[in-house]
Image (cartoon, rainbow, N blue to C red):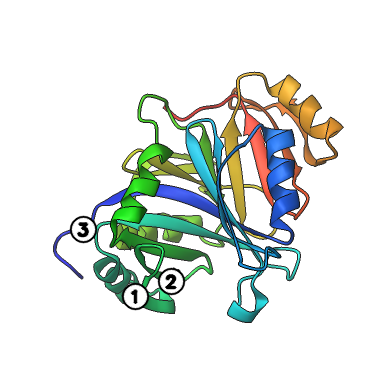
């Protein structure tokens, strides 16, 4: 593996949906998302890329492209989400991941939108889109995405068959550092947090989310947020309740099946 770990600057959840226009409206109406960027195909039928700001964090989103193997949870029993890591050196990080057991899904290549990208699948089935800027346009577009004055309030969540092995692999392959770990009496991981730069990925129990990916969002008034989501037609999959670890939370599915959790717990 490379002796020097390539620096990773930002982590963006990227949602693939069936009907991006409707999804953008849903996230705006239910979660208060602000639309930053929308790039439609020339015929206007599909959205190739969009960005929504939720608090200090940006969520990326695109329509399905079945001809490219890009599908949403509505198309199959898996996940339509890839984690997009902005890094210093795509090729070096991809090599590091492959040597650690990942599978190359799409080889590194330069793209017209100003980024060099590849896609890898980790040994546990989750896909990661790795990219670094190769043109001025990409640098300019990225500049307003991460207000550093605010603490993050949106966190990607992953489920693994072997959480302990996943914690070790994420550290070995991508350079994540353990931020928090909570286990039950049998040593099973109930909740874990892995930090990379200013970003945190959560791992652990989310039984309502069979596809293995979810998004957790910190909100100040959970009850009001729950009422807003319910009134907008969100499917509540985890009732609003106080937890044993001091958070008040609920879970919901959006119109395309993605699983979201909202609560007043916020990682330090």
Q: Where is residue 181 drawn, in percent x and y?
A: 44, 40
If the image is split into quadrants, where does the C terminus sit?
top left
On the image, numbered disc 2 is attached to which residue?
Answer: 120
**Mark 1: few, some, or many residues within 10 Å (few <14, many ≥20)?**
some
Q: In the image, is residue 83 above or below residue 243?
A: below
Q: Is residue 222 left or right of residue 88?
A: right
Q: Earlier in the sequence, mark 2 or mark 1?
A: 1
Which of the two residues, 203 or 60, is positioned nearer the viewer here? Answer: 60
The reply to whether residue 208 is visible in this rendering is no
The reply to whether residue 119 is visible in this rendering is yes
Q: Earlier in the sequence, mark 1 or mark 3?
A: 3
Dot 3: element: loop
Q: Earlier in the sequence, mark 3 or mark 2?
A: 3
Give yes or no for contact between labels 1 and 3 (Cβ–Cβ under 8 Å). Answer: no
If the image is split into quadrants, where does the N terminus sit?
bottom left
On the image, numbered disc 3 is attached to which residue?
Answer: 5
Q: Is residue 3 left or right of residue 215?
A: left
Measuring 33% from the left and 71% from the top, which residue is drawn there? 100
Which of the two residues, 189 or 6, is positioned nearer the viewer here? Answer: 6
On the image, numbered disc 1 is attached to which residue?
Answer: 98
Q: Count of labels shown?
A: 3
Q: Where is residue 29 drawn, in percent x and y?
A: 74, 35
Measuring 45% from the left and 57% from the top, which residue is drawn there? 84
Q: In the image, is residue 192 above or below residue 17?
A: above
**Mark 3: few, some, or many residues within 10 Å (few <14, many ≥20)?**
some
Q: Where is residue 58 drawn, in percent x and y?
A: 50, 42
Which of the two residues, 216 or 245, is positioned nearer the viewer here? Answer: 216
- Residue 86 position by quadrant: bottom left
Give yes or no for contact between labels 2 and 1 (Cβ–Cβ under 8 Å). Answer: yes
Measuring 75% from the left and 50% from the top, which residue is drawn there? 22
Dot 1: element: helix
């Amino acid at each position: 593996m490379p002796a020097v770990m390539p620096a990773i600057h930002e982590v963006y959840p990227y949602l693939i949906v069936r009907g991006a226009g409707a999804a953008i409206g849903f996230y705006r109406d239910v979660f208060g998302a602000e639309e930053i960027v929308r790039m439609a195909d020339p015929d206007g039928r599909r959205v190739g890329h969009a960005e929504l700001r939720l608090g200090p964090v940006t969520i990326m989103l695109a329509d399905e492209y079945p001809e490219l193997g890009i599908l949403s949870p509505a198309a199959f029993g898996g996940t339509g989400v890839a984690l997009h890591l902005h890094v210093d050196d795509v090729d070096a990080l991809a090599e590091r991941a492959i040597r650690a057991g990942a599978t190359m899904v799409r080889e590194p290549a330069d793209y017209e939108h100003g980024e060099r990208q590849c896609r890898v699948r980790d040994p546990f089935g989750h896909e990661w889109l790795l990219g670094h800027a190769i043109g001025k346009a990409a640098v300019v577009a990225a500049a307003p995405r991460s207000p550093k004055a605010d603490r993050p309030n949106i966190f990607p969540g992953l489920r693994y068959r072997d959480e302990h092995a996943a914690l070790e692999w994420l550290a070995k392959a991508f350079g994540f550092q353990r931020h928090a770990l909570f286990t039950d009496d049998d040593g099973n991981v109930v909740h874990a947090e892995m930090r990379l730069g200013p970003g945190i990925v959560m791992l652990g129990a989310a039984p309502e989310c069979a596809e293995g990916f979810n998004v957790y969002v910190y909100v100040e008034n959970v009850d009001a947020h729950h009422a807003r989501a319910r009134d907008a037609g969100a499917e509540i999959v985890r009732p609003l309740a106080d937890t044993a670890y001091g958070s008040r939370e609920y879970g919901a599915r959006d119109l395309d099946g993605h699983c979201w959790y909202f609560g007043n717990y916020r990682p330090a």
